[in-house]
Image (spheres, grey):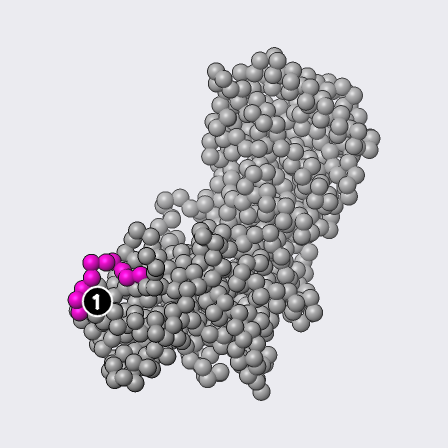
Amino acid sequence: MQNYTIFVPRLLSKKEYFVSGHRACIGCGEALAVRLACKAMGQNVIVANATGCIEIIASQIPYTSWKVPWIHTLFENTAAVASGIESGLKAMARKGLKADKGTKAVAIAGDGGTVDIGLQALSGAMERGHNFLYMCFDNEAYMNTGIQRSSATPFGASTTTSPAGKVSIGQFSWKKDMPAIAVAHDIPYVATACPSYPFDLMEKVKKALSVKGPAYIHIFSVCPTGWSCPGDLTIRIGRLAVKTGIFPLYEVENGIYKMSIDFTELRPINDYMKLQGRFRHLTEDVINQIQNKVVEKYEELRRKSVISDAVESGE
Amino acid sequence: MAQRVGMEVSVAIGEIVKLANTDVVSAYPITPQTHIVEHLAELVADGELDAEYIPVESEHSAMSACLGSAATGARTFTATAGQGLELMHEVLYVASSMRLPIVMTVANRALSSPLSVWSDHSDAMACRDTGWIQIFVENGQEAVDNTLCAFRIAEDNNVLLPVMIHLDGFHVSHVIEPILLPEQSQVDAFLPKNNYPLPLDTDKPVAMGDFGPPVIYTEAKWAQEVNLRKSKETILKVWQEFGKSFSRYYKPVECYRCEDADTLLLTMGSYSETAMTTIDKMRGEGKKIGLIRIRLWRPFPFEEFRQAVKDIKTLIVLDRAISFGGPGGPVCSEIRSALYSQNNRPEIVSFIGGLGGRDITVAGFEEIINSGMEIAETGSDNEFEIFGVRE
């Protein structure tokens, strides 16, 4: 992160591997994140994609946005498919049936495909130690099917299956801490990222690809359609999620936590929430409850972390 | 020279998968299949088979890992049974639709509930619409031979479809039989290297498993159907060549003492061998009875089947699965449908028996045949007869 305090887009490759022409909604944070991740990965990867927004927007026969080998099979099995790809390449290279090009298997899925229905396959693949990268693009609900809650939906958010109502505040449970679950598998690399911090995201993707063994990146992907916010606020809302401490950016290398960016003072969460229709119904009491939880979680993370060189004020 | 050696059938299947120089084995334990993947694990652990062995966390992932592996062009094997096959169910459709040549042994097992680890054909019949090639075998030698043929059929570039080899759990999987395993050189001569035409490869990126709107879905499914039907040509060719190399011949519909028979019993799987003993006995008594077995269940061999039953009066079908609330056994219902348009069709009597490992003895088959012949004369109000049930 400290290397990128100056905006240096000229240093980036102009090559794209996830190209335009797809059907994502205006302002889609996930499509942007996928594009940046692909730019960082380059062409020596095979992508296994779970069913979800990215899969349907970019692969309708006879079109594709993918310029790297890409496979979609089902919703919950992407980590297992990636296991098979990695094993197939490894066996054939070892037996001299195909050249060893060092191609990496990469699995991508949304939050539903990762934290809910795909969790078992992901856990299995991480535990077995396959040499692969798994990226979860988290837009905090099942957006492809029409904004239903997942276990990654934040407390209090109104979705179509956790609607705010006269006797309901919306989502009734706290967001599942998927990066912590990945860390608990004792894998070499876990990180969080957000396309509002593009260089940080790309740096982490590159690092994750270079690791031998399983790597997991959890990527915060703003969804204007599902969150009821203007499409031109995607970058700002992503930044606010980080600056309020709602979605801290950090990495965990061989079990050691490091904040990618740390704030001396967090912005109040309402700066983030008030821009989104999904939180509009929340009372001050509930917002305070969420605020306390966010601060508590953030402090817990700081305590676990070695101090980062990148300390910023929250402003 | 290859020698006949007594070994457990599951072990023999592991040996032939090794001789086929399989690249990736994905494995999850389930009775009565487990000895197959256990033996493969030993072969990999001892360095006798150079393969990636993926000990997955479920059958759903077992088949999913096979998708990924086969898509890279690696020779891919797995095995399962009963509930495991059911857990894989949605993945099975993807394997065939994406034309991934995966070979899977299914040690046929009944489905819960009540829990039963014993054999019947409920699991096999539940996946008859998944688009796989399905081959039934009756003993260990057939299992070994057809597993080898399965790799060649699946990977043939005119086919590129996954193949299931069905053998009855315990009755075949766990018995020790004299097995003739081929020499490595014979296998190498029979089975060419896997040459998957469009693998996932960075030199030539492909997109597999795209999203198909209504404008293309019907065409995709029709292409799949044409492909599966057409695979029969290759299956017959592979069996023919196998016969030439190994002197054991396989056919889509196998007949036993069918010459001049007026009544035929139809069975699938291991119970056929008991049924043969019954046929011998009844033939000895001068009855004109024979046995047919459907070996190739998918693609269904309409032509060969119709030919086999064209001159008979009565066909007695034994199913080892129930289509609940429907026409009875799935095999019999397909047989009836296959013969409906024929001018000279036999009387068809449907029996269901042998569920969840319940044995049918030589005397039991005699009872089925005798009461089948009687029903053919007198008729029955039942859609099917259930054999040996205590009411």
**Which residue is rendered at x = 17% and y = 69% of the image?**
B377
What residue is shown with label 1? B375
Quadrant in which the N terminus of chain B is drawn = bottom right
Q: Nearer the viewer, residue B72 or B197?
A: B72
In the rendered view, tell whether residue A142 sits above or below residue B53: above
Given the current orientation, which residue lies at the most extreme top position? A284
Quadrant housing residue B93: bottom left
- Asked whether residue B100 is in view, the answer is no
**What is the span of residues highlighted in magenta in the rendered image?**
B375-386
Q: Nearer the viewer, residue B295 or A42?
A: B295
Task: Find out whether residue B171 is within the magenta segment.
Answer: no
- Asked whether residue A171 is in view, the answer is yes
Given the current orientation, which residue lies at the most extreme bottom position? B1
Q: Is residue B231 left or right of residue B193?
A: left
Q: Position of residue B191 (x, y in %)?
A: 53, 74
Q: Position of residue B331 (x, y in %)?
A: 33, 63
In the rendered view, tell whether residue A62 sits above or below residue B170: above
The amino acid type of the residue labelled 1 equals Ile
In the rendered view, tell whether residue B69 sits above or below residue A56: below
Q: Is residue B170 left or right of residue B346?
A: right
Q: Residues within 10 Å of mark 1 (few under 14, many from 20)?
A: some
Quadrant in which the C terminus of chain B is drawn = bottom left
Q: Position of residue A257 (x, y in %)?
A: 77, 36
Mark 1 belongs to which subunit?
Answer: B
Q: Nearer the viewer, residue A29 or B375?
A: B375
Badge count: 1
Helix, strand or loop at mark 1: helix
**Which residue is rendered at x = 67% and y = 28% of the image?**
A247
**Which residue is rendered at x = 42% and y = 46% of the image?**
B212
Quadrant housing residue A188: top right
**Which residue is rendered at x = 68% and y = 22% of the image?**
A293
